[in-house]
Amino acid sequence: MRNDTGSRGIGARRLTIAVMALATLSAACATRGDTTETTTQAGDSIDPIVEYVGSMELVPNRGLPGTVVSVTGQDLAAGQTYALTWSSAEGSWDIRGDAGEEYHGRVFTPTVMPLGSVTADGAGSFAATFEVPEDFGFVHDVRLVDSAGVIRNQAAFVVDMQVTISPDSGPPGTPITIRVSGLGRDALEGNRQILYDNRYTGWLSAVTTKGTAVAVIPATGGPGPHRIEVARGAFTFPYLNPAQSPRPDILVYDAVFMITDGTPVLPPPLDEQIPQPVERTSFTIPGGGPWITTDVEAGPIGTPLVVSGGGFAPGAAVTLTWYRIVGNRVAGLGWEERGIDFGAVTAGSDGSFEMSAEVPSDVGGPHRLEALVGATAVATTSVRITPAVDPIPQTVAWGDSVDLHMTGVGWTETANIYTIVYDNAYLGYACGFNSQGDVLVPLRATGEPGWHFIDLYPAIYKGVESGGQQSFRIPMLTFGEHPGEALPAFHLAFFIEG
């Protein structure tokens, strides 16, 4: 492993690099009874009153979560009791629009975590200790607050970053876990970019996870050493001369993974990766009037479902309309919601019906399903389409077609593309909006004989970012906190014959 001071070393089982920032969201806060967070809501926050008295000091004033810090104060009001607090924030994604289709960046709402209380002695001094909580990296204010809510003093603590890459060896396809804790909230502090053998793989985020990012990539390439770099970069791609930047304290890290001979570790079967249909469990029949529902509330294209309804007039002719979003963002014509025929049914003598159907081919995300009697809409429900990918050939010759076919790709700014990574090298993205969620990416098998790996990651297509950050159209390796929609990644592998 190496940071940009030039030192190098390879651990036997696990590579751990500790520098500028914080560690993970774990049990430390959960085991402390005094760490309940209170959140100041954006919009109703009031700047606190600050009236300094005396002095306070933290020793040490930087470290990882779990560090025991001695805090001392002098020249305070004798006998005065103060709350000791830790400043932090809760991160979220700013998603707007009637259908949640607009991405507007990140939001960090200030929070305060109590660390306990201290009381000054007759000389106006105190001494206490606290344990650094799991949190975002970089600077946090530790404050003395009196009973009136006035900040009487404060000192800064820097939460250091820790990078762990494990394991350090294995056969092709071995899952390599990259864990970075202590990412910050500012543009230059909050992103990490991954390079594998000097090829760009994707980015890490930790907006909703208190500064901790975890990604898993496959070991790719032939037997021997392979370099993994955890680089910095807020403007889409890695910043390659960080030592000359205005923030040289935000370091970069690298490690070596050794690919060994042996049976490859292949991705799970696709039927284990594709989101399974979600049964509807919370529907309650209304007290009066027509209603409809489906037994499945979410699933990929082709999922069987049953539409049922009740409360209709006996023998009523009911038509069903499925609503879709049609259009794109690049032709200048925009998009609109359109209804298509989903079938017709006649209510029975008790005013109910059941109709078998399947999830139609369409863009991913929620779709309104409406029941009409004549030209009047009388009941509605919703079905959400989830992404899926078809199998690829398992054994090919160099240059053969290894086309990727996806369905259920979405249409919002956060869901309408998937990015393609080939042997840990980012190739580009594919959009599913204009083709109603159906995506075909023509690829050719290239590289040395042996196993090759393709990863499909969700991404943010476009939107508004504040603070100069740019995270558009690049693989989101931390897709577990994908903004807007919860979207899966897909992992494929094939063998090129020699």
Image (cartoon, rainbow, N blue to C red):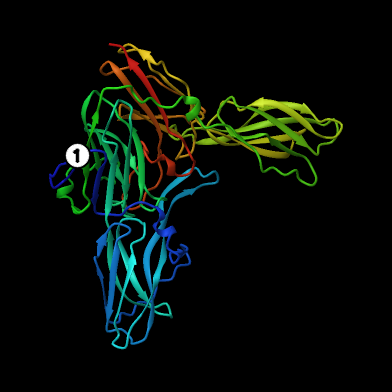
- Identify residue for label 1: 10
Amino acid residing under circle 1 = Ile
Tell me: residue 433, above or below residue 413. above
Q: Residue furthest left?
A: 6
Q: Residue at x 45, y 40 (%)?
A: 413
Camera-nearest residue between 118 and 387: 118
Q: Is residue 267 above or below residue 66?
A: above
Q: Quadrant of residue 419?
A: top left
Left or right of 383 in this view: 143: left
Give x and y (percent) for residue 393: 41, 15
List the single residue furthest toward the front.
Answer: 12
Horizontal and vertical percent for residue 268? 44, 27
Q: Is residue 54 visible?
A: yes
Residue 205, above or below 343? below
Q: Residue at x 76, y 45 (%)?
A: 286
For the point 69% across and 42% down, which residue is it? 283
In the rendered image of this protein, does residue 276 appear above or below residue 125?
above
Specify the quadrant that holds the N terminus.
top left
Q: Nearer the viewer, residue 49 or 156?
A: 156
